[in-house]
Amino acid sequence: MTILKGIIAYSVTPFRENGQVDLSLFRRLTERLVQSGADAIAPLGSTGVLPYLNDAEREALITATAEQVNGRLPILAGVSHLTTERTIHHARFAEKAGVDAVMIIPMSYWKLSEEEIYRHYEAVAGSISIPVMAYNNPATGGLDMAPALLKRLLQIPNVCMIKESTGDIQRMHSLRSELGEDVAFYNGSNPLALAAFAAGAKGWCTAAPNLVPELNRSLYEAVQQDRLEEARSLFYRQSELLRFIVAKGLPRAIQAGLELQGVEAGHLRSPLQPLSPAEKQELKQILENCGAL
């Protein structure tokens, strides 16, 4: 099955002033990521405000991504939903649209048991034939999947990738120890980019290529070529930005950063609000410090 690697770039979902998704602008922003040197494109992640979108909007964005990318790069599409039935619906739609893999985070109102989480993944993965990335992010999904549960999920035939976003580097080492050196796990915590690669991550799932693609790409290449001193230097150049975009919220921070770079980025969907003038000034200084302005 297709295993992603390298820089997996997460696209933003821009909105018009009237609150509608701006598909034309989304295509242009997606093309920027394709041209940035990313190894894969990932619509409908946290950066793309997946939970804030209705079914028709999700489908339109997946279709637009598939058409814009047009086979040039692999596409990893978010298809998560509170219910198994709707997750299956979106996973099937994504497969039919031509994406290469889907990402699923278990979303909950009632806290799900490990058995419920397993059966959720089993049902969704069994309804499609493309690879599935299991996404662990307790800060947004409200559930923390332990390495033992992730190991069990990997027994489902097409669940073959794990995205770890707890922000705990020891968790990544535990994954490597529990699941073996061949497991395809991916870093979803931007401030841990260098440490995660050192722990054996196959790729970095990140919104940062919207703002600093050259630094992201160079870091990955330095790690792959065992140029550790250079990798550390490249990481330190972008580490302040990586911490900022996580602390302020990816949709807000990426939109503001694009605007500072002179790139049209649309509006946010309420209740999300733009960065304050002080926060935007802070971001401007950070971008200047890392040579992105």
Image (cartoon, grey):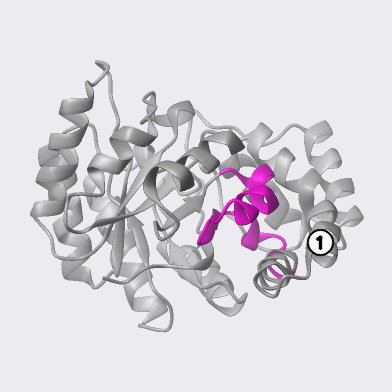
Q: Position of residue 45 (x, y in %)?
A: 43, 48
Image height of 239 relative to 35, above or below: above
Q: Residue at x 48, y 27 (%)?
A: 139
Q: Residue at x 62, y 40 (%)?
A: 252
Choose between 264 and 151: the one closer to the eye.
151
Does 293 sit left or right of 192 as displayed? Answer: right
Query: Hey, which residue is sitting farthest top in the picture?
Result: 110
Q: Amino acid at mark 1?
A: Leu
* Residue 196: x %, y % from top left: 61, 50
Q: Is residue 261 magenta?
A: no
Instruction: Give the left or right position of residue 227, taking residue 250 as reference.
Output: right
Q: Residues within 10 Å of mark 1 (few under 14, many from 20)?
A: many
Q: Is residue 285 above or below residue 149?
A: below
Residue at screen point 22% across, 47% down: 55
Residue 275 in picture, x, y percent from top left: 70, 35
In terms of image quadrants, where is residue 235? bottom right
Please report the residue visible at 21 percent of the width from the left and 31 percent of the height from the top: 117
As rendered, which of 106 and 82 lies closer to the eye?
106
Secondary structure type for disc 1: helix
The answer to if 209 sits in the magenta stretch is yes
Using residue 116 as the reference point, say whether residue 273 is left or right of it.
right
Residue picked out by circle 1: 234
Q: Specify the segment rendered in magenta.
A: 189-214
Relative to 245, is 260 on the left or the right? right
Residue 243: percent from the left, percent from the top? Answer: 72, 39
- The C terminus - image quarter: bottom right
